[in-house]
Amino acid sequence: MFKRTFKVVYRPIRSNFVLLPDQYYGVVSTYDTGCLSLQYNGRTHYASWAPQKGGGGIKDTEIGINARAAKEIGLHENDLVKCALIADVLNLRSVHVTPVSSKDWEIIELSTEKISGSVLEQTRIVNSTQILIVWINKSMQVALTVDRLKPHMNYGRIDHNTELVVAPNLYKGLTNGTSNGVIEENTKLSRSKTTAQVKDELTEKLTPLTHSSTVSNVKNTIQRNKRQDHMERLKKDLRRESSRSFEFRVIRGLWREQAQESDVFVNGKHLPEFFDLDLFYCMHTAADKDYYVRVRTVEDDIEDDLPETIHPSIELNANLMKLLGIKELERVVLRPKTTVVNFVEKIELFANKKTHYKIMENAFKRFVIERTQHKPMLFNQEEVVRLEDDLLVTVGILPEHFRYCVVDAQFLKESKIYAADLVRPVGEIIKEETPPTSPLSVQDLIQLPEYDKIVDQVVQELRMNLCLSADNSVMRQCNVLLAGASGTGKTVLVERILDQLSRKPDYCHFEFFHGSRSKGRKTESIQKDLRNIFTSCLQHAPAIVVLENLDVLAHAAGEQSSQDGEYYNRMADTVYQLIVQYTTNNAIAVIATVNELQTLNKRLSSPRGRHVFQTVARLPNLERADREIILRELCSHINVAKDLDLVKFSNLTEGYRKCDLVQFVERAIFYAYRISKTQPLLTNDQLIESLEHTNSYCLQGIQSNQRTGNDADANEMRVEELPGLESVVGVLEEVLMWPSRYPTIFNASPLRNQAGVLLYGPPGTGKTYLVSQLATSWNLRIISVKGPELLAKYIGQSEENVRNLFNRARSARPCVLFFDEFDSLAPKRGHDSTGVTDRVVNQLLTELDGVEGLQGVTVIAATSRPELLDPALLRSGRIDRLVECPLPDAPARVRIFEALSSTLSLDECVDFDWFAGKTANYTGADIQSILTSANMAAVKEALAQFGHEKLAKKISLKQKHLIESFQTTRPSLSASDVAKYHRTYARFTNKEKTSREFVAKRATLA
């Protein structure tokens, strides 16, 4: 982050800070917990910047540093350094240091308080194995070698809670009573010296300069002091080299043949540099336990048990892991034992069962002789040794403070082996491989081809980019974003991916973070939990962090500023920084799941210099074949009837998600058990009954008119039942029914099927009634929307409502999307001062002919003012079928009277032909109003004549009632209104010459 290249200049500052130019300081100074990464001459060093601007003549192309501090890290004046900001650095618990020379140790002993108070004022970032300079005053300074950091990292930040541990003085000689098994790391060098060397070192002192010294003596003294300082540095370097540590991740293994409990195995093809297999190693665990081991390479024929990757792995006996409390994929550190002192008095053997001492001693000697022909053996105190298949002995070493010993054939001749009579039971020995804990919550998985492709793609990319395979050694960032609606199987898909990568030979660690459970929490609290998860994955790398429902925490913020929007933006920035920080140069990948890509905050989905998610996968909707596979698998756990038709139910469950299908089958199975608890049998009737219940909550907002019985086509509407709209029914039949009736013809067509119809006509002509009746008659799924329902006052909310509506329709296809009062939702653009409807029109255009298309979704819009619609919506390929719903003529009005009065008791004198001739310009709604008013008049007359008690069940409707109602009912459209609509529709359909001028003319809603 914020990469720059600067030239190094020396500045007389007494600190390890870096002086930055004013401009760059203003950029990075806001990151209180950050540091600088300095890259130069093939090396990388981490440092903190001075808490004030550079000043002092620091140019914009320069950075300043103390000359002594620069020398210790290999920097020279005028060198070019690449600087980059590390946004967040972890704090250190402790820093272990040792003085570089004896002079430094003497200064430390005299100035302990001064040093402890000056360290934080002079440095904040400490690197592993660096030489740290601490200034006591203007003329005195101390050089300290950083031996190790806790937790184990390459660099870290120190604060007031960090413990500074200075190793004991190496120049006071040996201490008595130290055993060979507990030699401290800072005394190993003294242990390897002879007595004469130690004596010379103890008596060697710096010769002070006196006023009487001659020039030659002064020169000799200076040379001797320089030579001594040089020797001290050389000894320190040799000591660091000899105490080189190697970090491995632990793989669980069984007790191999011809191996001990203390034998650990590595892959010989990927050994770390300078790793010596001839040495014994002290294994240090994360729980601060030490155990001495011998490292062996696996045989060629079984190398597949250990991963051949750039990540160093070590196989430990499962019993040893249990003894030391080591979990799989934890990190252990191996440090070589360069000096081995083997002053052992005797070895005691304790059998796990009653065994004669001679048999035990002979078996142990044979065991040692057979396995030490080339190399000696290593035994730990209280180590369990398997001499034979059923004979286990516990090894005791005397003196007891010895923690290990090295044994070979010569050792058996010189030392005593004692087989004790005491029986010491051994805990349960793990002999069989236990299957790894699977992240899968559902073991019986249903394999679907499209989902399998996503799993294989993600697994392959993670293996390649995390270097989990031997084919790749270049680590790259690989974060995955999975999008799918709730209940589509995102969690199970992630669990399948983790199940493959956590097993042999990948051995990938994983951690879960559930975003929905953290909703409403403070940003700082969530950041702390996420950092702990990422840190744990860093210690177990290669690893995967799963962020479930990330869009719940980092939801898309609206364009208007709000408190929720600021919270979502802060959360998105926090997640972004953590992902970039931990995944850029580490073997860590992130898998995040969201419901919709549009609901994720743009700060995570939009590239800011680079994409934080390199792979984006959308979970597809279930096709008919997928639903059939799921239904067959779910029904396989119960006896089913022979005539069970799952193909039919796979068609009837169009739009169902995985969880919906599970609910559907489980409810049907419940109905089967309710009939017979001992021998339940699943039949079509139970599935039909279950389908009626599940449709109510699985298809919320979607009116499903699909028939489940065998008489699905029995109630298909006849054209005669919709008088005056015969031509409209014919057009809708072509658009809605023909593609499903003749799929072979339409699938072979190279053109896109028509998916949009506009119904226009005066108010009351039956546009809405027609669509509802056809949906019921033709068994269609329909989503009915009134235009103003989708409009919202917040910017961006209206477009999101349109987007969600089309997504819902796609998930329930085949489906009809019906927009009533379409002119209020999609008027011409440029006439709305707020711009809301303009953006809605743009979103509609995107959905109607976008990349995803509308296969299986038909859009029907109804309006009485088509001239107000935006012309772009009516172009070819969108809503291109324009169908007029005209006013009914005289024969049609007669049929409307007859159809609406079919449930009424009519007198013989009623003459609908007379009314049809009198009701010109009347709509179907007006005719219904006449019949309703006439029926009310007949009821009033009957009540006045017979009273409440003697009122008949059916009241006859007479001609006089209809005439009375007709005289009081006026048509909703006057003659001038009808003429105006005719002229408007003629211009709209280009039947008049001024149609183009009319379309171009500015329209208003006045």
Image: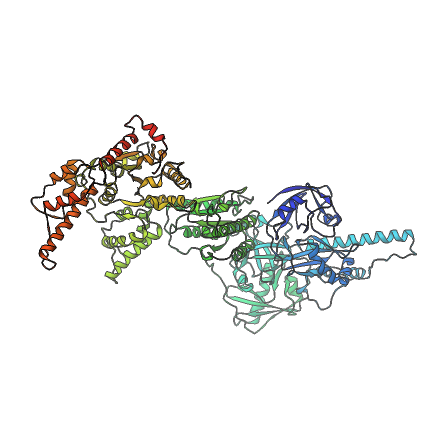
Residue 729, above or below 681 = above
Along the viewing direction, whichever of 920 and 244 lies nearer the viewer: 920
Q: Is 932 on the left or on the right of 72, as rendered?
A: left
Q: Residue furthest front?
A: 968
Whether residue 759 is visible, yes or no, is yes
Identify the image quadrant of residue 384.
Answer: bottom right
Quadrant the C terminus occupies: top left
Camera sees residue 953: no
Query: What residue is drawn where x is 41% and y is 52%?
Result: 492
Q: Quadrant of the N terminus?
A: top right
Residue 269 rendering spot, x and y as whole percentages? 57, 48
Q: Count the numbered circles shown.
A: 0
Q: Residue furthest top?
A: 993
Image side of residue 541 versus residue 718, left or right? right
Residue found at the far bottom of this picture: 421
The residue drawn where x is 61% and y is 44% is 2
Q: Quadrant of residue 817?
A: top left
Left/right placement of residue 140 relative to residue 992 reads right
Q: Is residue 980 left or right of residue 358?
A: left
* Relative height, residue 586 to residue 987 (above, below): below
Coordinates of residue 998 in the picture (x, y in percent): 33, 30
Q: Nearer the viewer, residue 819 or 640?
A: 819
